[in-house]
Amino acid sequence: MAARRIPESELILNDGDRIYHLNLTAEMVADTIIVVGDPDRVSKISRHFDKIHFQESNRELVTHTGEIGGKPLSIISSGMGTDNVELLMTELDALVNIDFKSRKVNRRLKKLNIIRIGTSGCMQADIPLDALLVSRAGLGLDTLMSFYDRSLSEDLAVVENKIQRLLELPFKPYFAKGSDQLFDLFKDDMHHGVTVTAPGFYAPQGREIRLKPKITGFIDTLANTPTSFGRFTNFEMETAGYYAMAELLGHEMISLNALIANRANQTFSSNHEKTVERLIQLVLEKLTYS
């Protein structure tokens, strides 16, 4: 069967060779990529580079590609939420695995190494404020994976069904694990846990400001629910989307978290930028010298 040609309305290009939203060419992306949510965090990481070769931005999507210690690296911001994650992962994959001239998928696929650096709130009282955590797996409380055909292993399906039942969710959550290879790179320097990815910051993470959340008490429920991948430890808004998309596309992906709030203890870091900088330094050291 002949390879499918992807139409112009589905694979949208700028100037013939730049992917639509990222506005990048394949040459502008390294094989190892650090992703962040905050566009301002890109320069806070790239300032450690020995050289910066490319800088590009479009909306909240900022890219700096350069090298440190002779290792090529790209830093890219996604903005917040799994909708942006889906866009970013799809376009990164297209840059390295689709021939833009023929509009066909390459016969030989490239695997990217992608590391998320982000902030997160902890749900376990015994993990200290400003700790660092590597996500063994992610639970998605959004519906992104309802739009993709995804085959599940039995252990992942067990968690999805269990959480839907426990939280009485009107939709099926999704569960995905991170890269074993990248997990092993960081596991000795951080706490481990399962990250909950929410489709919002307030009610979807159990916060009540003026509007009362419809689903209450689920933080305690999750905090006390074991899985074969470890306990649920923290909340944020991207990790599960990254893990599920990386699984489907065949890339290595890991999420690293600076825990700047503790929901169980009702505390917030007084110096969270210092914690994030410590995480950045650790990641660059591991990627450069390991």
Image: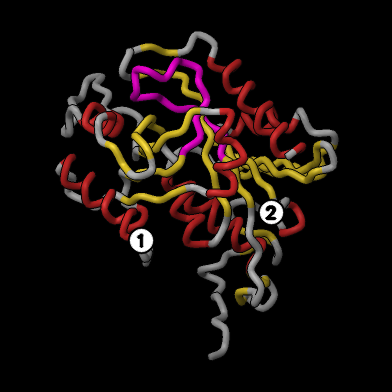
**Residue furthest bottom in the image:** 1
Quarter of the figure that contains the C terminus: top right
Q: Which mark is residue 128?
A: none
Residue 122: percent from left, percent from top: 39, 24
Q: Nearer the viewer, mark 1 or mark 2?
A: 1
Quadrant in the picture for residue 237: top left
Does residue 59 show up? Answer: no
Q: Are marks 1 and 2 in contact (CB under 8 Å)?
A: no
Badge 2 marks a residue whose secondary structure is loop
Q: Is residue 6 left or right of residue 136?
A: right
Report the magenta residues as a range: 116-135
Q: Residue placed at 54% from the left, 61% from the top?
A: 250
Instruction: Tell me the amino acid under the disc marked 2.
Output: Leu
Residue 247: percent from left, percent from top: 48, 58
Vertical order, 237 against 100 (above or below): above
Q: Residue placed at 51% from the left, 53% from the top?
A: 87
Q: Is residue 132 left or right of residue 112?
A: left
Does residue 247 show up? Answer: yes
40 within the magenta span: no
Residue 54: percent from left, percent from top: 78, 45
Quadrant in the picture for residue 8: bottom right
Within 10 Å of disc 2 (Cα), the crowding (few <14, some 14-19, many 20+) is: many
Mark 1 = which residue? 153
Badge 1 marks a residue whose secondary structure is loop
Upstream in the sequence, badge 1 or badge 2?
2
Q: Residue placed at 38% from the left, 11% from the top?
A: 267
Q: Residue placed at 42% from the left, 13% from the top?
A: 268
Mark 2 = which residue? 24
Residue 31: percent from left, percent from top: 70, 53
Instruction: Tell me the amino acid under the disc marked 1.
Output: Ser
